[in-house]
Image (cartoon, coloured by chain):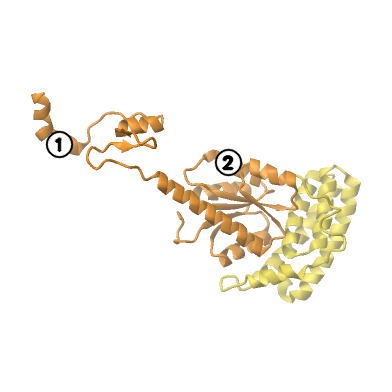
Amino acid sequence: MTAAPLATWPPPDAPVLNLSAITLLRELEGPEDPELARETVAVFLTDGIRRIGELRAAVSEGRLDAARRTAHALKGSALVLGTVRLARACAGLEEAATAGQAPDAGAWLERAAEEFAAAKQALVEVMPRALA
Amino acid sequence: MRDGMPGRMKVLIADDDGPARAFLRAALRKLDFDSVIATDGRDAWDQYRSSHPSLVLADWVMPELSGIDLCRMIRAENRSRYTYIILITALSGKGSYLQGMEAGADDIVTKPFDLEEMAAKLRVARRILGLQTELKQLDGLIPVCAHCRRIRDEREVWSSLEDYVTQLTDLRLSQSVCPTCYEAGSGAARPARAAS
């Protein structure tokens, strides 16, 4: 699969959180999904904490294929939630892992961990009950 | 449609990512589709076989079985009813688009999701599946002579049911007598045959 070059997507100055993703989730709420946005953010945060842990273990043990798969999964989640800078860091980690570049993978992992922390803070600000 | 509620098309959502599944399920509900959920590729294949969705919305990268593999398996089954397949990718280039089409996908959507784009693609899917159904129904209209039961083919030639089926397929009709004709034959048909 050919990924778009990192240089063009997402832009380096992308926001921590693109609020339109959260707005869209809220618009989709209805009688059968009254808390869609909050629940989706909660799943993202729980999965994200686990995935960052898995990425740390995989990169430190040199299991780059596992790191590539987890980075791809976290990237997909991040795109759905509009946490664009996290998605970019995950894309970088995915590319580095695919290329077998362990040092680059380590650097992108640190970026991903920082961006996840920033994304978490931004999400909790707009959705205080997400961690409840 | 072949699905439960009339007019509501059934869509199989196959994605290993929780937030993506939550978004897609809610979006499909809003767009008036029924959905069934699979959490990996193998689960998707099982759900496809048991729930017969009209449309499959599958993530490209999934554990157990990728969206591309799922696509190939669905196409290899060659069901009489067409299944419309949309693959989901995160960051797509032209290479992946072509690879998806070659595997049998009808369309691709990319994350982040856009509700309007999704609605447009699903509308196209509904239209194409509707045309497929109409074509099947037209195919099903075979002109038959009300008197001798001969069938007219596309060359305007009238032939027996046996010849018609043999021309169109590899099937050969085996000769037999149904219970009703057997009973009837014991009355009118046998004397006629005996007289000749």
The amino acid at mark 2 is Met
Secondary structure under the numbered disc 1 in the rendered image:
helix
Q: Is residue A20 above or below residue B4?
A: below
Q: Chain B: what color?
A: orange
Q: Residues within 10 Å of mark 2 (few under 14, many from 20)?
A: some
Q: Considering depth in this image, is A21 or B138 the residue closer to the camera?
A: B138
Horizontal placement of A110 versus B179: left or right? right
Chain to which mark 1 belongs: B
Kindly indicate which chain is depicted in yellow in the rendered structure.
A
Name the residue beneath numbered marker 2. B73
Residue B65 in view of the camera: no
Secondary structure under the numbered disc 2 in the rendered image:
helix
Q: Is residue A95 above or below residue B181?
A: below
Residue A17: x and y in percent read: 79, 67
Report the residue at 41% width, 29% height from top: B170
Precedes in sequence: disc 2 or disc 1: 2
Label drawn at residue B183: 1
Q: Quadrant of the C terminus of chain A?
A: bottom right
Q: Residues within 10 Å of mark 1 (few under 14, many from 20)?
A: few
Residue B28: x and y in percent read: 58, 62
